[in-house]
Amino acid sequence: MEKESLLSQSRRTFLKTASVALAGVAGLGIAGCAPKGTSGGNETGTAAGTDTKWDEEFDVVVIGAGCAGQAAAITVALEGNGATCLLAEKGTMPGGNSPYCKGTIVYAEDEDAFNQYMLEMRGEEGTTPDDVIAAYAKGAVENYPWVFETLGASLEEASIVAPSTMDDPLATAPEWPEFEHCYALGKLTVAGNKDIEIKGDTHITKLLDRVISDHADVIEYRTDAPMSELIQDPSTKRILGAVIDGKNVKANRGVIMCTGGFEANPVMRQDFIGQGGAEPAINKLNTGDGHKACMKVGADFWHMEHVAGFWMAGRDLENTKFTNNQIISPCPKQFGITVGVNGRRYYMDWDGYSNKSDIEYMDDPSLAVGSRHGHMQIGGEWPHLAQPRRAWFVFDQAGLEAGAIPAETTSDPVADNLAYAADTIEELAAQMNVPADELKTTVDQWNECCANGKDIFFHRPASTLTPVATPPFYAQLCIPSFLNTDGGPVRNAQGEILDPDGNPIPGLYSAGEFGSIWSGVYQGGGNVAECLIFGRISARSALANA
């Protein structure tokens, strides 16, 4: 990736970000305030740090206690020769999406081959520089020994899918079997062995939390401790500390931002990914606090459009809750079709997690279908699919009995206000408030595709061609669902946050999904891996900053 093209993109991204920030200060809550004991902020609203009255002092301050923050704090404890660390979490437990994820971690053994797989996933459309990709690949090789040898996770209780070779390239079920070096992928999951009783740490966050507790002499771990802003020297631009829970906390060697995404901020969702009506599947705490703080100190931004989504997921008719597992295979959407408010299908509406088992090694990805963390094949490429704010999942009685709304969710979806039902498609359309003639035509066309064994409109797999023909007919409300956003401040291979000219902001680092490196397509387990990799990288960079 040429540096000039990255900087050009970065400048455009920054201008967009700055425009949104200035135009939407009230909506995003970005109004600046000076920390306690100062004479006020500088002209941009950033806290002036040269005359700050400090309430506390640590060598490294880590903001956010998900996997990235936990890994950073542990690295300070293990490699800092007595350096002190504050790990501040605004929630009541290890934060962000980390506690709710499956916990699968990408690792590698062949650094060069895995680096090639990462470059293949980045593709031509990605903007992450080669050296940042290389830092990730090097860190992926460290993940296995770090988890099992350094941290002491149980090998017996873990699930390990070791990297393979070109002789058996799909042994690890890679997200992208079409890419030549996919065999270099390895995956591990703490406590993932389903054949034995788990007696140790039940999740990667539990393991990290235990190690943090073992190093309480140097790690001060606080919950209910939100960060409101960074404290910056106005002349040197160096980050001196942060305002945390109303206190001015000095960071002698640096601040590491591990605040995750902006999933729970509908204004930012609409501004940056055009999906204000989408609903995150998991977390409510990731409101973009770190993004706002870094905007004020002059950070550049990237990958703001990148997200693990979107799936059109089943909801109750009042749009208050999800009714079934909308993301992981098998997906109930194979038992019907999805239509928009105009009564028409509008995309390859079997948005199951993937159909990797149907793909041969090095097949042509431009012809494959399925959803891979929300990436869908459109015009031969794999962007994220923008979804409307609402749609309808339409199926029949046979589809219901097959699992369109799982039996464990309800025995009567109409009585439980999960779906409309009618004896004819026209009557169903009236309840859905969609054009009856359009819906009837769509259903007729779909049933013809099922009879012929081929979806001529959107190329759904033959195994998902389930007709909508046996009354009563049902319609369930759907809205866009997703897991996490990846956009945030640009980081370099050392974990340093950069300004729009590509220069590091002194004393400021990041890790995890806060400005993630993923910019092309995505490999499952890659975000948790990134949390560990750049948690270590950024902590080491901060420790080296005397």
Image (cartoon, rainbow, N blue to C red):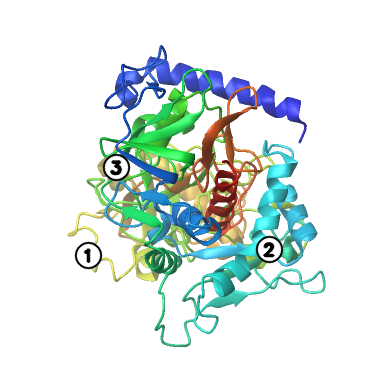
The foreground one among 382 and 438 is 382
State which tag comes first along the sequence, 1 or 3: 1
Query: Which is nearer the N-term, disc 3 or disc 2?
Result: 2
Q: Secondary structure at mark 2?
A: helix
Under mark 3, the amino acid is Met
In the rendered image, residue 53, in percent from the top left (x then y), is placed at 31, 29
For label 3, the residue is 432
- What amino acid is labelled 2 in the image? Val
Label 2: how many residues lie within 10 Å, few (<14), some (14-19) or many (20+)?
Answer: some
Which of the two discs, 1 and 2, labels the residue nearer the N terminus? Answer: 2
Which of the numbered marks, if any, corresponds to residue 448?
Answer: none
Crowdedness near tag 1: few (<14), some (14–19) or many (≥20) residues, C-alpha within 10 Å:
few
User: Is there a contact, CB below 8 Å, between mark 3 and mark 2?
Assistant: no
Q: Nearer the viewer, mark 3 or mark 2?
A: 2
Q: Label 3: how many residues lie within 10 Å, few (<14), some (14-19) or many (20+)?
A: many
446 and 527: which is toward the camera: 527
Q: Secondary structure at mark 3?
A: helix
